[in-house]
Amino acid sequence: MKTAWLSKTIVTPDGIRSGALLVDGTMIVDVVAPTAVPAEYTTRDVGTAAILPGFIDAHVHINEPGRTDWEGFSTATRAAAKAGLTTIVDMPLNSDPVTTTLEAWERKVVASQGKLHVNVGLYAGAVPGNASQLDGLIQAGALAAKCFMVHSGIDEFPNTNAADMRESLLALKPQNVPLLAHAEHDLGIVYDMSAPRSHAAWLASRPPTMELEAVKVLIALCRETGTPVHIVHLATEIALPLIAAAKKEGLPLTVETAPHYLYFAAEDIPDGATQFKCAPPIRERGTRTALWQALIDGTIDMVASDHSPAPPALKQLDTGDFTKAWGGIGGLQFGPSATWTQMHLRGLNLSQLARWWSTKPAQMLGLDATIGSLESGKQADFVVFDADEVHTVTAAELEHRHQVSPYVGEELRGKTLVTVLNGNVIYAAETGYAEPQGGLVLNPTSGLAKLNALPLAAQTAALTRCCGATKWVTQMQAALPFELQSDLMALADEIWADCSEDDYKESFSHHPKIGDISKLREKFAATATWSAGEQAGINTAADDVLHALAQGNADYEAKFGYIFIVCATGKTASEMLALLQARLPNDPKDEIYIAAEEHRKIMHIRLEKLLTGT
């Protein structure tokens, strides 16, 4: 469907303009003058409401699987859509299991299916001893890795020291993806337990020097390894000069702060108001002012909610005990509007809102080729935003699982009227929600993402390299996109098992004969490198073994009508010859299924090579 969204305020990379955002299917075509809208486009006029790129929240704790009673994919993504967010990224905790292994990754992906109202990316967890897992997690689609420099709040996600982080950074360096760090360093400060309801006591227990010392370590590691580092939820001004100097030096360092640090001030938080408890804590008005200036001058790159909800009992709402309450803000639904409320007071503009909530997050995540701005060829993710609407937040309007948030009772400016994902309206203030249409956002450097994104002809060629049966290739292609490698492998087996003998023979014909690597015909050029590697055992074979293989190949083909198929990876030439000779006496009705099983093994190896780019 072709739609022209008309607005007097369209926020583009070149500035704010009046015009029409042209959308064809899932893609942005252009921004043109209203008089230049082609006749085939259906128009939708939003008047004075602004159109901005879909907001991106790069720091969300969805807590599923395992702690879905805290939040969950369904409720979190409903809240996101209502906020104008089109992409959110889930932290590797507080789900259970934490996302530090491929097995845990797959469990989280499966748990998300069918529940996503917006697109969701996932981070890997970096904990002591799991650096060797990170490459596999990035290849599976993780957008980055996250670590804690202090206790995370749950024992199953232990904090890292400098040596641990160095290992993680070196593991992430080949993919050039960032290590995200909760930047607080334990200074051994004792919490004053004598005033458990005091926010001031909580604030004193997490002084700005904890952040400063952590930032020093991160900058040094970033300089040493050259791997990107992203500091999450910065809440102090005393680290800003170090960060500014590191950026001037050219280090790949990015920084976010959170809306609650930009909106609230410690002086205004009453005792017992544990809905405000978070780490680092909300600091004083002077800090808030400094953080805003750092956003404006670019020392801080972006804003993200750090939505970290918990059930009311864990927040100790009945007792107001800061010493026992879970530390985390329920704010996913209000991040952009809370930010805009304070921006309006400071005379800032919608282009800056788009930069901090769309463009910069997309760049940090490596997704800026497809989202983060309203440009031709990018994904049609955008929000229709009434920048002048003022409303007082009520608990009843929260889409989070629990109606607990420090924003309840606050008068916020800015309201999402319509949220559009992949060209489709997923939320409208007047009509509510569409059925879940979101999907998993994979790291674009991962093998699955690359396969999913290939043009049709290139997909066909890539899959044909793995299996030459037309039926198999066609059905695999129809199932794209894949979110899990295990799903791809399982479907590959399922389709192969349903193939006919003619399909098997067609696929066999795409292989060179065993031992014939040096004489590959032109039709095998696409797989020549793979075949040579798979048959590496041929390279050290004696002449008599090669001669026997050639004769055996001829005898086999004469008897069965197709070449001898064996999974040659890891086998010597003599082992392959012995298998050939053992199978020559087989009944043709049995042999083709033996060959098909060998081909299935080859297919798995080639799919893995396709995904890893080897």
Image (cartoon, rainbow, N blue to C red):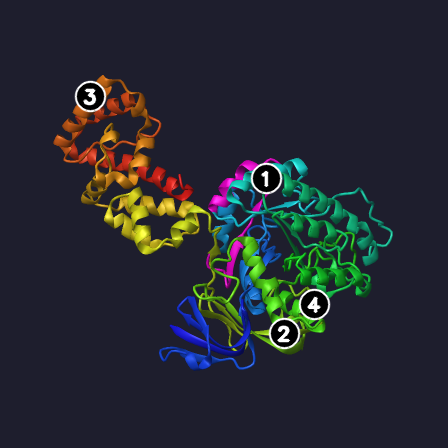
- Tell which of 111 and 102 is nearer to you: 102
Q: Amino acid at mark 1?
A: Ser
| Quarter residue 531 falls in | top left
> Which residue is the site of mark 4?
407
Write the start and end of the magenta stretch as one range.
Answer: 113-140
Secondary element under disc 3, as helix, strand or loop, is helix
Front residue (pair 225, 272): 225
* Residue type, numbered disc 4: Tyr
Q: Which mark is residue 168?
A: 1
Q: Which SS class for mark 1?
A: helix
Q: Residue 47, how many percent across, how many down?
A: 53, 82
Q: Which residue is denoted by mark 2 in the rendering?
A: 414
Alpha carbons under labels 1 and 3: distance apart: 50 Å
Secondary structure found at label 4: loop
Residue 356: image tag: none
Q: Residue at x 41, y 45 (%)?
A: 486
The amino acid on which the numbered mark 3 sits, given as a three-letter code, is His
The residue most toward the right is 194
Tell me the residue at 28%/23% (across/down).
573
